[in-house]
Image: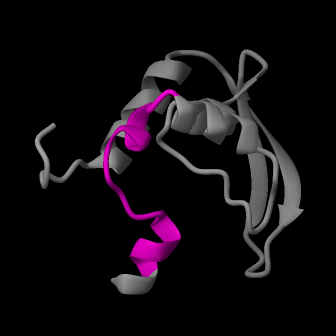
Amino acid sequence: MKEGQSNPCGITAKQILIDKIGNNKVICISEGKDQYKRTLAECYVNDESLSSYLVRSGYAFAYRRYSKKFIIDENYAKFNKLGMWSMEFDYPWDWRKKN
C-alpha cells in the first residue's frame, strides 16, 4: 500500500472472519451486558476465540479501557507489524471522536 492511501480495514477484518469461520459452527458465550444493555460475548470456532484471532491478526484492538484480555495478542500483532500495525491508523475510539 502506498503512503497516504486509505485501506478499508473493516472490510478486510470481515473477510478474515469469513475465511476463519468457513462452514464451522460458531459458539458464543455471554459475558454479561455493557452500560447500554448490549450483550457482551466472546465467540469461538473450533475452540479458538475469534476476538483473539482478529486482534492477533492486527485487525482489531485490545480495548484496554475495559479489559486486559487481548493485550498479548495485540502486542504480538504490533511486534510483527501485522494488519493495521503495518500502516498508519487512528484507533477506532479516536477516529469516532474526530468524526
Q: Residue at x 50, y 27 (%)?
A: 80
Q: Nearer the viewer, residue 70 or 12?
A: 70
Q: Work out whether 17 lies above or below 65.
A: above
Nearest the eye: 62 or 79: 79
x, y percent for residue 41: 77, 50
Is 98 placed above or below 72 here?
below
User: What residue occupies the far front of the structure in this picture?
Assistant: 79
Asked if one can make out residue 38 in the rendered structure from this viewpoint, the answer is yes
Residue 42: percent from left, percent from top: 76, 43
Q: Is residue 87 left or right of residue 30?
A: left
**Residue for point 74% across, 68% down:** 65
In the rendered image, the quadrant that contains the N terminus is top left
The residue located at (85%, 50%) in the rendering is 30
Drawn side of residue 6 relative to residue 54, left or right: left
Task: State the residue at coordinates (36%, 38%).
Answer: 86
Is 81 within the magenta?
A: yes
Q: Quadrant of residue 24?
A: top right
Quarter holding the C terminus is: bottom left
Q: Which residues are magenta?
A: 80-96
Q: Nearer the viewer, residue 58 or 18?
A: 58
Q: How many marks?
A: 0
Q: Is residue 83 left or right of residue 74?
A: left
State the image coordinates of residue 47 (x, y, percent, origin top left).
Answer: 79, 19
Position in image of residue 96 (x %, y %): 43, 77
Colour pattern of the rendering: one colour
Q: Is residue 21 left or right of residue 62?
A: left
Q: Residue 13: say if magenta.
A: no
